[in-house]
């Protein structure tokens, strides 16, 4: 696409020695020529592509700053347009005045993600790759970085595009058959189509299955901290976060609603959820909090059940059995955390382990949140049961909910196609489902998109990217 406007925006934020201001569009070189004066007296329009030049930014006769100007020319730039990056000193005044100068000379301030949106519309990347740019910027650990980088390099897109291309060929052949319906000809071999569809179902199912890991890598593994009132749930949350996030009180029922925050342990982000204490109560508000506690258990991948080390074994076992029953067949990790171990006379781990007959997904740890005893052991247990491990550097993993939903719809249509081929469904009905598969795969890479979808995606980008 050819855009009539030239946009500018800061590409860096926060304190630092250097700030970068980006400029992209048809008048980039001309606008830069009006404010940048190189030491070599060379005009910006005459500068070779992919070169860096030292000079001054001037507002009339006044020198604003000494800068480096990087020149990128269409089509070999991030956006596919003539683009410039001005590296200036990181003074808020300099950056603000530089942007004002560029706007005075004819540029427009860019909106969120507008540079990347232009890159997509100019064919420099597909939509899945464009979304990966935002994920790469937001990545907080090695696994999230690898997923985003692989997607940005087109690993996911290549896999989908290859399958979509084959399916489009078969669909065209079947639709051609409709033009010769009276002659009873078959241009698309049904056995070959069935083999392709079965292969696609396996591929789509594998990608969808990867979403579970991809989602927790991107957003953090949800960990619900549950237990009866006053067993130390809020104290443990504060200790894990290393801040006073939750109110700690001797009064039972202090926590009425769930409190969430994230922390990185090792290379894994955990999203801890402190919940209302589970008990019988007539308090309406507290009961709402307890109801939400059970909802958070459903959503969690790991459940930390806290118990007081001074409680009798039968009480701890009863609490554990209740949560065990609720989480059975849900592929959750259940960790019984015996808190306030500093106030007990002896260790309870061996005794309780024998009585509970723990499965591979169940564990016991003794700690004291108040005295900071064995918190490191609990953190090591959380890391070991997360089951994420190191991803293969070339693994294609889905972490985007929009992609997952599109794949789910595509899988449903593929299964209908498979059933239709087996039952010898008429060609016109078969092509309807084939077209649905092609459509949903196309929405992922942006081969099929709407203004609404693009708006929803790019409004979440940062300014200047």
Image: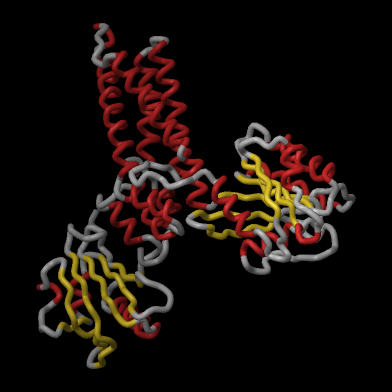
Q: Which image quarter: residue 133? A: bottom left
Question: Could you tell me how many numbered marks the image carries?
Answer: 0
Q: Which image quarter: residue 465? A: bottom left
Residue 218 pos. (x, y %)? 48, 51
Residue reaching furthest bottom? 61
Residue reaching furthest top? 183
Q: Is residue 389 left or right of residue 247?
A: left
- 123 w.r.t. 109: above or below: above
- Residue 460 showing in the rendered view: no
Q: Nearer the viewer, residue 379 or 349?
A: 349
Q: Is residue 216 left or right of residue 157?
A: right
Q: Which image quarter: residue 97? A: bottom left
Say which residue appears at 33% left-offset and 19% top-offset: 195
- 169 w.r.t. 187: above or below: below
Q: Nearer the viewer, residue 138 or 71?
A: 138
Residue 66 pos. (x, y %)? 25, 85
Say which residue appears at 80% left-offset and 60% top-offset: 343
Q: Nearer the viewer, residue 194 or 244?
A: 244
Q: Nearer the viewer, residue 290 or 161?
A: 290
Residue 313 pos. (x, y %)? 82, 44
Residue 340 pos. (x, y %)? 76, 59
- 51 w.r.t. 347: above or below: below
Chosen colour scheme: secondary structure
- Residue 64 showing in the rendered view: yes
Say which residue appears at 44% left-offset and 59% top-offset: 138
Q: Is residue 26 left or right of residue 415?
A: left
């Amino acid at each position: 696409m050819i855009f009539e406007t030239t946009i500018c925006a800061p590409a860096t934020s926060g304190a630092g020695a250097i700030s970068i201001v980006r400029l992209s569009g048809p008048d980039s070189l001309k606008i830069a020529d009006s404010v940048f004066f190189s030491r070599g007296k060379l005009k910006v329009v005459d500068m070779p592509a992919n070169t860096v030049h030292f000079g001054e930014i001037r507002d009339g006769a006044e020198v604003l700053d000494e800068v480096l100007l990087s020149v990128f020319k269409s089509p070999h730039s991030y956006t596919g347009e003539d683009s410039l990056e001005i590296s200036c000193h990181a003074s808020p005044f300099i950056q603000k005045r530089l942007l004002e100068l560029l706007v005075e000379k004819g540029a427009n301030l860019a909106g969120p993600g507008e540079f990347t949106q232009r890159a997509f519309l100019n064919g420099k990347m597909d939509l899945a790759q464009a979304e990966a740019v935002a994920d790469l910027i937001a990545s907080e650990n090695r696994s999230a970085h690898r997923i985003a980088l692989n997607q940005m390099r087109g690993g996911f897109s290549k896999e989908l595009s290859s399958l979509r291309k084959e399916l489009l060929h078969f669909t065209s052949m079947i639709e051609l058959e409709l033009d010769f319906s009276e002659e009873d000809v078959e241009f698309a071999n049904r056995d070959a189509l069935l083999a392709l569809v079965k292969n696609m179902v396996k591929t789509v199912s594998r990608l969808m299955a990867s979403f579970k890991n991809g989602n927790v890598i991107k957003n953090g593994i949800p960990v619900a901290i549950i237990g009866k009132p006053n067993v130390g749930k809020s104290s443990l949350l504060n200790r894990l976060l290393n801040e006073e996030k939750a109110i700690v009180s001797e009064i039972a029922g202090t926590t009425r609603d769930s409190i969430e925050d994230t922390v990185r342990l090792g290379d894994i982000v955990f999203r801890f959820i402190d919940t209302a204490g589970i008990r019988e109560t007539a308090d309406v508000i507290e009961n709402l909090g307890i109801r939400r506690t059970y909802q958070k258990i459903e959503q969690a991948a790991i459940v930390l059940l806290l118990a007081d080390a001074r409680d009798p074994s039968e009480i701890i076992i009863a609490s554990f059995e209740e949560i065990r029953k609720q989480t059975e067949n849900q592929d959750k990790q259940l960790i019984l955390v015996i808190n306030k171990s500093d106030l007990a006379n002896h260790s309870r781990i061996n005794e309780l382990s024998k009585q509970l007959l723990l499965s591979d997904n169940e564990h016991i740890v003794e700690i004291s949140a108040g005295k900071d005893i064995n918190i490191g052991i609990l953190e090591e247990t959380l890391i070991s049961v997360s089951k994420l491990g190191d991803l293969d550097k070339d693994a294609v993993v889905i972490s985007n909910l929009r992609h997952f939903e599109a794949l789910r719809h595509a899988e449903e249509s593929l299964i209908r196609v498979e059933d239709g081929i087996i039952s010898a469904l008429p060609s016109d009905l078969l092509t309807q489902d084939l077209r649905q598969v092609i459509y949903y795969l196309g929405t992922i890479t942006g081969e099929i998109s709407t203004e609404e979808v693009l708006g929803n995606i790019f409004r979440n980008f940062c300014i200047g990217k």
